[in-house]
Structures are given as C-alpha cells and as structure tokens.
C-alpha cells in the first residue's frame, strides 16, 4: 500500500458541478493533512489544511477528514475552468516526522 | 515577504557533467525538502533536512545524488555524472513545524534540468 494514495485521474467535471477528490493514507497516527494545487508548469501551492475530524470550509473548497477511516477529501463547489489542475494530497507522518505527498489527481473542468 | 527561491531556473547540461542546484528557503524555516518531478508525473521525494538532525536521504535515487544544507539555511543538490533520465524539474520546499506536526510546506519555483 502506498503511504498516501490518490486516484490519478484524469477526473473530468462539468463547469458548475461539484468536484470530489479523495485521498487515503497509511499512517494511523497522522494528525495534519493538506491539499495542494499544481497548475501545469507551475509549483504546488497550498489551498487548504485540516487537522480535526469533520469538514472545513473555505470559499468554494471544503476539506473532509475521517481519521478512523484514514481518509481525507476535497470538494470543490461550483467548479470553474480555472480549477483545472493537479490536486496533491499531503499527510504529515508523525513517525517519520515528514510530509508525504500522494501522486496527485488531474482535474479538468469542462465549460 | 520573500518566498523560497531556487537557482538556476533552467539548466541545460551534457550527459556526464556535474550540476549543482541551489535552494534558499524562507528565513526561519527549519525543514527543507527536495523533490523531483518528471513531466506529467507526481512529486518524487529526494531528501529532507530538519534542523540539526541527520538528513533523511531515503529518496535519493542513486549515489550520484547528494545534498548539503549549510548553516541550517541554503541547500545545494548536486548531481554527478548526469544522465538523460535525470532530466526533470527539481523542486525545493521549506516549512516550519509547529507542535503536532502542523507543517505547511512552501515551494520554490523549481529548476528545470535538461540533460542532453
């Protein structure tokens, strides 16, 4: 099992719909979870972090965390073509004391 | 404030030559990571420095790769005897770890390496 696993996609969503991105992780002791967005040819940029179980909302973005299931997701409401990018899930592994990234999910929003 | 900077932004070299890539982290950030990203691929972890601890070199793909971090700040990634498969974007990120692992990484713009 990969340490942090994401569906590689590509995920295609019509404009205005909800895009749902999923991530599972192997370290049960992990406490900190991050979503990064990477546009083609650019560096990753942080868009959200979540530390507690439940939902965290920021504008059109909602991060959801379920530590018991070792699952974190990112929902993008009212998807826009500008949301088309690769989304990277990252988990801070307590044992190794380092941030571990998933392989990313490529999202395309179709006008 | 200043973000993470990397130099050079682009590097073209011939197979067999050595290259050095530089990363200036955000001031005060104790952690520094190097990643490699090939075209269309995910981030490949290379090496991780945290404060004065011994670096985590578990991601270095071969002994041709090495990295240093001087004075807990600037880091240099060296690739000796470059091969064509080393062509990729090399990304540096820095962070400061708060209690509980609340660590947010900030990425530099990357160095695009092309080995001919």
Image: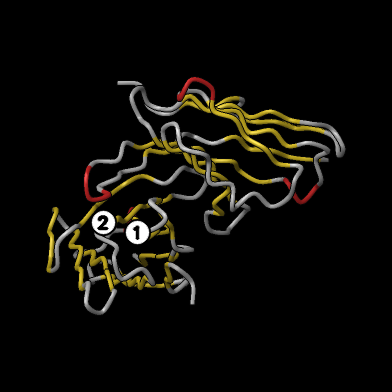
Residue beneath disc 1? A91
Secondary structure under the numbered disc 2 in the rendered image = strand
* Residue A51 falls in image quadrant: bottom left
Residue A86 visible in the current orientation: yes
Q: Residue furthest front?
A: B53
From the viewer's perspective, is residue B96 above or below residue A7?
Answer: above
Quick check: A92 left or right of B36? left
Check the residue under mark 1 and report the chain it is in. Answer: A
From the viewer's perspective, is residue A88 above or below residue A110?
Answer: above
Residue A84 visible in the current orientation: no
Circles 2 and 1 on the same chain: yes
Residue A11, which numbered label?
none
Q: Residues within 10 Å of mark 1 (few under 14, many from 20)?
A: many
Residue B46, how many percent across, how many down? 58, 48
Residue B58, how many percent across, how many down? 59, 53
Q: B32 or B87: nearer the eye?
A: B32
* Residue B31 falls in image quadrant: top left
Quick check: B96 left or right of B82? left
Q: Earlier in the sequence, mark 2 or mark 1?
A: 2
Residue beneath disc 2? A32
* Residue B66 falls in image quadrant: top right
| Residue at (43% x, 38% y) in the render | B50
Residue A83, how many percent across, how many down? 33, 56
**What count of labels does the image hold?**
2
Quick check: A42 left or right of B97? right
> Would you say the residues marked 2 and 1 are in contact, meaning their CB atoms lie under 8 Å apart?
yes
Quick check: A12 left or right of B65? left
| Residue at (29% x, 65% y) in the render | A29
């Amino acid at each position: 099992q990969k340490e942090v696993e994401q569906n590689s996609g590509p995920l295609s969503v019509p404009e205005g719909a909800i895009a749902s991105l999923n991530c599972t992780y192997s370290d049960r002791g992990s406490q900190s979870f991050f979503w990064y967005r990477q546009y083609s040819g650019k560096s990753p940029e942080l868009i959200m972090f979540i530390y507690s179980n439940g939902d965290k909302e920021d504008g059109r973005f909602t991060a959801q965390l379920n530590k018991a299931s070792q699952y974190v997701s990112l929902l993008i409401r009212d998807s826009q073509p500008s949301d088309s990018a690769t989304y990277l899930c990252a988990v801070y592994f307590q044992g190794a004391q380092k941030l571990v990234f998933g392989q990313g999910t490529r999202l395309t929003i179709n006008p | 404030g200043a973000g993470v900077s990397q130099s050079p932004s682009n590097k073209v070299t011939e197979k067999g030559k050595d290259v050095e890539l530089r990363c200036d982290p955000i001031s005060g950030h104790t952690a520094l990571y190097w990643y490699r990203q090939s075209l269309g691929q995910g981030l490949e972890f290379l090496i991780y420095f945290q404060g004065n601890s011994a670096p985590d070199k578990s991601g270095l793909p071969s002994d041709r790769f090495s990295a240093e971090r001087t004075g807990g700040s600037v880091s240099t990634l060296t690739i000796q005897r470059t091969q064509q498969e080393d062509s990729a974007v090399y990304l540096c990120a820095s962070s400061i770890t708060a209690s509980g692992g609340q660590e947010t990484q900030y990425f530099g713009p990357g160095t695009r390496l092309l080995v001919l």
